[in-house]
Image: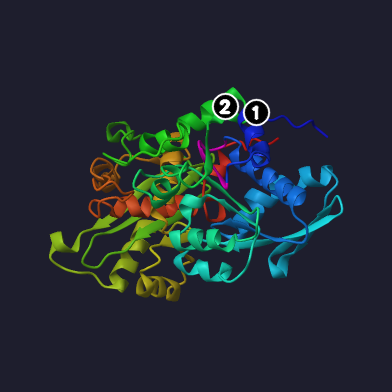
């Protein structure tokens, strides 16, 4: 097996708990900087070195996130070190044995405000919260309160968000007060990431996302959301056959409705045509049946493999399903959708073609709010929303970035 290599920053994470004076560690910074791998491995080693027959918490935005980001990376190394691993999937726990010790690690998903109830009442010797900035404050604080065993410690990792984020204010700005070791990671701190791959990641992000995910800064989003998009450089739709077709829909009655027709050619998706209707401007609202007819006209007899629709448009979704369309409810996570859309545009995974005038107009108007929070203005956003829905549904749902980005591993 390949010999493991650790950067100086990762070694600091692996050893911090051997020092006195800290009750917590916080690792933030760039994406793919090696912080999660080092933190999860250190957490298990600390637990198995310092405790016997205790319970610990492994937390992420979802249980699948715990398994993918924490367990999958640490397990091969722990087994190589002689630890025996037993996962009880139905109970959401992992039992780790080695060196005459045995401890239990409970898996928690903290993706919404109701998640705190899942961890309420349990006593833990330590808690690791991966991507803490994506979790509600109620869950993070409840998890921290569960860590009441003598010698227990808290472990946090996250990518930066805005400077008004509660985790930045309460934990990072007050790290010394909370007796927390704060470590900021950069891509150079991951010895498994080559310069070529680092450059690829640097090209993927723009604006506030570049400063956060590449430079590791807690910075405010401001100005145009897609400030790199050049409406004057939109190409004509390519000639020849397309391999697949999809339609994305942002539904509106009083607000505008925006539909996009997307065709795939040579693993690139092109927005070749669109439909846009503003009821206020036209002075008449359309019915679900009329919008369904507009969608048929946009499809133009093509075989549409999926229609991705605004999840709040329940009546329109039902109308389309009655007519036999294959409808998929869109993933409506705004910030994640914007980030992935920017990546898809910059990487060339999606291309908006000539003639898509509504999309071109909104790219030049779609802006961040100026209140210091990560929010976009609720105006000029209907084509932007349908494009975001489309990107979030690429490759079977949930994202497109994985097809362009090489995953570095140790």
- What residue do we see at 80% from left, 32% from top? 2
Q: Main secondary structure of the magenta part?
A: strand
- Disc on the earlier residue, 1 or 2: 1
Q: Which residue is the site of mark 2?
A: 188
Mark 1 lies on a secondary structure that is loop
Badge 1 density bin: few <14, some 14–19, many ≥20, Cα 10 Å: some
User: Could you tell me which quadrant the C terminus lies in?
Assistant: top right
Q: How many marks?
A: 2
Q: Nearer the viewer, residue 23 or 194?
A: 23
The nearer-to-camera label among 1 and 2 is: 1
Q: Residues within 10 Å of mark 2 (few under 14, many from 20)?
A: some
Snapshot colouring? rainbow
Residue at 52% in and 44% down: 179
Q: Give above or below for 84 relative to 252.
A: above
Task: Tell me which corner region of the image, top left, top right, bottom left or bottom right, holds residue 146.
Answer: bottom right
Q: Is residue 67 left or right of residue 319?
A: right
Task: Tell me the magenta residue range.
Answer: 23-32
Q: Position of residue 361 (x, y in %)?
A: 24, 43
**Pointer 1 residue:** 7
């Amino acid at each position: 097996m390949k010999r493991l290599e650790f950067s100086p920053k990762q070694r600091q994470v692996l050893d911090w708990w051997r020092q006195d004076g800290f009750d917590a560690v916080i690792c933030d910074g760039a994406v793919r900087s090696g912080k999660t791998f080092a933190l999860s491995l250190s957490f298990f080693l600390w637990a198995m070195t310092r405790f016997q027959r205790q319970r610990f918490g492994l937390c992420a935005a979802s249980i699948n996130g715990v398994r993918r980001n924490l367990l999958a990376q640490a397990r091969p190394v722990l087994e190589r070190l002689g630890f025996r691993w037993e996962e009880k999937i139905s109970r959401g726990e992992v039992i780790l044995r080695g060196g005459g010790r045995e401890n239990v690690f409970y898996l928690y998903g903290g993706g919404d405000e109701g998640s705190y109830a899942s961890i309420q009442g349990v006593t833990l010797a330590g808690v690791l919260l991966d991507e803490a900035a994506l979790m509600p404050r109620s869950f993070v604080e409840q998890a921290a309160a569960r860590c009441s065993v003598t010698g227990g410690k808290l472990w946090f990792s996250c990518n930066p968000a805005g400077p008004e984020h509660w985790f930045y204010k309460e934990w990072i700005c007050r790290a010394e007060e909370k007796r927390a070791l704060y470590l900021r990671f950069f891509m150079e701190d991951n010895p498994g990431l080559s310069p070529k791959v680092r450059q690829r990641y640097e090209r993927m992000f723009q604006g506030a996302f570049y400063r956060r995910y590449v430079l590791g800064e807690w910075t405010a989003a401001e100005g145009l959301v897609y400030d790199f998009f050049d409406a004057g450089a939109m190409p004509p739709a390519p000639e020849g056959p397309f391999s697949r077709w999809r339609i994305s829909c942002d539904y509106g009655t009083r607000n505008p409705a925006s539909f996009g027709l997307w065709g795939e050619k040579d693993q690139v998706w092109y927005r070749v045509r669109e439909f846009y209707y503003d009821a206020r401007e036209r002075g008449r609202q359309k019915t679900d049946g009329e919008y369904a007819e507009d969608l048929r006209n946009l499809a133009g007899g093509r075989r549409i493999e999926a229609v991705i629709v605004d999840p709040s448009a329940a009546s329109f979704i039902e109308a389309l399903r009655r007519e036999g369309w294959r409808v998929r409810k869109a993933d409506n996570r705004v910030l994640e959708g914007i980030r992935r859309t920017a990546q898809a545009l910059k990487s060339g995974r999606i291309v908006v073609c000539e003639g898509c005038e509504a999309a071109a107009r909104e790219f030049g108007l779609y802006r961040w709010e100026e209140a210091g929070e990560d929010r976009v203005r609720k105006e000029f956003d209907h084509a932007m929303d349908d494009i975001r829905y489309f990107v979030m549904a690429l490759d079977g749902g949930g994202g497109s970035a994985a097809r362009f980005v090489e995953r570095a591993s140790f």
